[in-house]
Amino acid sequence: MENHLENEHRALVRAEAPGCTVLLRANGDFPLAEPCPLALYGSGARHTVMGGTGSGEVNTRTFITAEAGLRAAGFTLTTDRWMDGYDAELMAARAAFIRELKARARKHHTLAVMEGMGAVMPEPEYDLPLDGEGRTAVYVLSRISGEGSDRQAVPGDILLTASEERDILALRRKYAKFLLVLNVGGPVDLSALGEVENILLLSQLGIDTGSVLADLLLGRACPSGKLSTTWTAWADHPPLGDFGDPDDTAYREGVYVGYRYYDAAGKTPLFPFGFGLGYTTFVLKAGEITAAGETVTVAAHVKNTGKLPGRETVQLYVSVPGKKLDAPRKALAAFTKTEELAPGERGEARLSFRLSDLASYDEKNARFFLEGGDYVLRLGTSSADTRPCGVVRLSGDAVTRKVRRCAGRVTVEDWRPDEPAGEELQSLPVLRVDAKDIPSETVSYDRKPAVEDAVRSLSVEELAYINVGAFEPEHGMLSVIGDAGVSVAGAAGESTGRFADRGLPAIVMADGPAGLRLSREYFTDEKGVHPLGSSLPESMTELLTPAQAYVMRKLTGRKPRKGEPIHEQYATAIPIGTALAQSWDTALAERLGDMVGEEMTCFGVHLWLAPALNIHRDIRCGRNFEYFSEDPLLSGRMAAAVTRGVQRHPGCGVTVKHFAANNQETDRYYSSSQVSERALREIYLRGFEICIREAAPAALMTSYNLLNGQHTSESRSLTESVLRCEFGYEGLVMTDWLTAAVQSPGKHRHGSPRPWRIAMAGGELVMPGTRKDWRDIVDAVREGRLSREQLEINASGVYRTARALAGKQR
């Protein structure tokens, strides 16, 4: 990528990222008027976290830490000795942690790389003098998590360490101005820090995180984000469902996830869903409410009543009748973010939703329906700060969609809260809607997939090649992460390229979701492209034994001939998924998606393995930083915005993932998510449906986990009935990497996914592809377990996607 484009993209991220940050507490001390002597402390001062680990890592040319960003902005940092001391403590703790992981791997008879994938080292305890000069101090608290391991409610992870709590409180008392900065990908229990008056959730903002912090401190940019997940004390964490069970994880909370639970249980979180302050204040007032058919629109008047410019996010929640079927106290129905308003300036926002989007799922009758009665509209700036502004009175019950059951054998019983107390609504305006105006649909499952003429003449063996990712036919070599690409160095994988001369080019795929993860440098020769060094994420390379490192060098360490030109492909890291959702700004997400699409075109990548939109069911999920929110509407809208941005570029597509109910990393290949049909449809599938209907993503990736005892990749109910027939999805369906190859002990190990069963379910690509996968499909057709017709349907899907992407990229 040319340097001018690299700089342009970096500037874009720096300009957009402040909108992803959330001011949790403020007393008016910030922003600062000018750079000054500053005492900088905390784990993230020098070791600022750009994003999570695993497939989400991005190989950037540079990364600006908090220390570097503040120095560049003109601050004089007075705590070099403290940061040096912390470096020594961290280095010793890290060495001990690596030794522990390697010992654990030997005990479990596995590779340390796999044992340590995503493993979180709790922050170390330390005792260093707080002797930085100046009247102002900043403490940057960092946490990291990643693919392959979940977070824990222990000090140094979800909980504060004794050292952190001690020092943060001491700094608040010692300095005239003190700001706690949270460089984290998910919630931390801040319940012990009630006296801290200034808290900024910086999050993990990608390539220029430190510069963004400096901009915020100096008021060159303003925080305008809102929480996309509830933050609470760990003691108040929802106790209903299981988490981290290696065999069966029961989602007993049902639809009461996140703020839906806290509302129903009558618990007050530290910081509610949708909450966020700014450097200014706003007054919000409801305006006219109108209805056109089933579409309801609420006007909202917003005024900046503070002394600085800023933006406000207006949120509309709705309470449904909930008499025939229990329901959350309220649920997000619409949201919008104002443009920047100057002090004293007024603006108007309009929020619209369809009543059918509020329908509840009736498990007994396999249908979505709206109960007749009053739908209370609540306008506000967080889930805990809303006011009733109107009532939509539906004349009677209305069935919006009749469907098939898709969840399989459900064994979990959902929690139901006590019935809420009544509410006085006499003074509110009432809009009457006739139930006959609500559209109703009976889904047809009699789909006739098109078969392309180009695949009809192919042999079974050739069709099977199309149904699995590209692999080396003589050796069946593959890669777990990176280096599987043939056309682009460090790409995650490709579809087969053996039929390029027949009009079926290879589809090149790169990991995400915070930017493209490719090799930094590469060279080319007559045998193709070759990365320089390993494309393994840096978080994993230190876990290799000397022998494993030697093998990796042999496999990936091809050296260029003398004089061979070296090419660069540094990508731009954007804010993590959770931070994007904290912007509540679909236009921002679309602009960053557009930037990624531009880089895809530059590097020759056709499919970005992002966005990831699994639900923040539990704050312990190690990959929550990749995901958007605990709310399916916010998740779906943000994913759709990213999709539109990327797919604006010819030949570029996204891969929404992981479908579905993928909410823990513990034994992720063989743990079964035990979910009711209602919770599955209202919470865990809803975001995917929104993204598909609004933006038509080019591809979708199934998840590793089982759903009620069946692997999602083998579920024809999910792939065919839900995706194709109910959602109208027309894109490519692929597996996650090594879905059919990884073995794990436990209850469901005997049911390892088989490529032929994946193909029979409608899965069109088994990734990254091995000779064993190919042979499994060929044998299944020969033995009558898999029809040639299904293989032709799958190959047609790959063919259409390859022609639409690889055939059109400029």
Image (spheres, grey):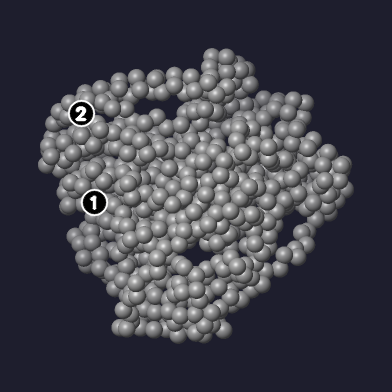
The answer to which image quadrant residue 490 occupies is: top right
- The residue that label 1 is drawn on is 25
Residue 357 lies, in percent from the top left, at 52, 69
Q: Secondary structure beneath disc 2?
A: loop
Q: Is residue 588 visible?
A: no
The answer to which image quadrant residue 723 occupies is: bottom right
> Which residue is depicted at the point 41% across and 23% down?
97
Residue 221 lies, in percent from the top left, at 29, 50
Q: Vertical placement of 18 versus 721: above or below? A: above
- 405 or 657: nearer the eye? 405
Label 2: few (<14), some (14–19) or many (≥20) C-alpha neighbours in 10 Å: many
> Which residue is depicted at the point 83% across and 52% down?
789
Q: State the mark number for residue 631.
A: none
Q: Secondary structure beneath disc 1?
A: strand
> Which residue is depicted at the point 39% across and 51% down?
238
- The residue that label 2 is drawn on is 79
**Measured Cα–Cα span from mark 1 to mark 2:** 25 Å
Q: Vertical placement of 377 versus 193: above or below? A: below
Which amino acid, mark 2?
A: Thr
Which amino acid, mark 1?
A: Arg
